[in-house]
Image (tube, rainbow, N blue to C red):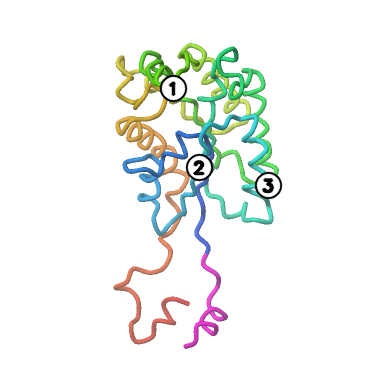
Amino acid sequence: MALAEAGARGRLLRWPRVLLFGDSITEYSFQENGWGAYLAERLVRRCDVVNRGISGYNTRWAKLILPRLITESTGADSIAAVTIFFGANDSALKELNPKQHVPLEEYAANLKSMVQYLKSVDITADKIILITPPPLQESAWEKACLAKGDKLNRCNATTGQYAQACVQVAKECGTDVLDLWSLMQKNQDFSSYLSDGLHLSAKGNSFLAAQLWSRLDNKLSALPSLLPYWRDVDHTNPEASLL
């Protein structure tokens, strides 16, 4: 059978998508042992995991980008889940990092705006997961800052305020939330979850992956594996199995 004829007979194959939207912690999630790579492996043949992490970005910039990533006409109906994972940059101290800093009230408003936008293109609240920033290990991050000629430009107590705001937005909007800031600090020495005091280590990636999978598994468990197992393909008439 010619390829054109096969294409005419078979419907277009479209995998559902899980969109990971966030800052560098999301951008780096497809690296070896990353939490995004873990999700992609668990969902292979059932769902495409799309990494839209953008290093250094905050919610002020993210809310401008989101409508360029998802619209009703570009496949919002194929979205199985969305994670929104910002705050590590928004919570930077204004006097030391004014470019990335976003005031707390604006941060909450920006998160709410992004959730409301997703709902407006028919992505329901049960498909949205907000993730708080992780805790900050200040001594390790200070070393990273000093190596670049900067002063310590974040503090964990401030990051915690942004995490609490994220949790509150999720409550108000009816979405799921993963409070990474609180969960990681249940371990008294949470520094092992972080590679440089801010970004995730291999252990931190595993921790986030497990926490997120426990929430996604229920949402995505009904998704079928697309295309039949190879042993189930009728090799004498593959068109019957594949089109």
Instruction: Name the mark nearer the viewer: 1 or 3.
Output: 1
Real-space Cα separation, disc 2 to disc 3, in angstroms: 17 Å
At label 2, which amino acid type do we have? Answer: Leu
Nearer to me, 101 or 135: 101
Mark 1 lies on residue: 148
Q: Position of residue 117 (x, y in %)?
A: 68, 39
Look at 54% across and 40% down and name the residue there.
Answer: 21
Q: Which residues, given as a range, are shown in magenta?
A: 1-13
Residue type at tag 3: Val
Question: In the rendered structure, does residue 7 fall within the stretch colored magenta?
Answer: yes
Neighbours of disc 3 within 10 Å: few (<14), some (14-19), many (20+):
some
Helix, strand or loop status at disc 1: loop
The percent coordinates of residue 164 (x first, y second) are 53, 18
Q: Residue at x 45, y 48 (%)?
A: 220
Q: Nearer the viewer, mark 2 or mark 3?
A: 2
* The magenta stretch spans residue 49: no
| Residue 111 in which image quadrant | top right
Q: Which residue is mark 3?
A: 121
Q: How many marks do you count on the picture?
A: 3
Circle 3 SS class = loop
Q: Position of residue 208 (x, y in %)?
A: 38, 33
Q: Residue 20 bears which disc, if any?
A: 2
Which of marks 3 and 2 precedes in the sequence? 2
Q: Secondary structure at mark 2?
A: strand
Q: Looking at the image, tell me whether mark 1 or mark 2 is earlier in sequence order.
A: 2
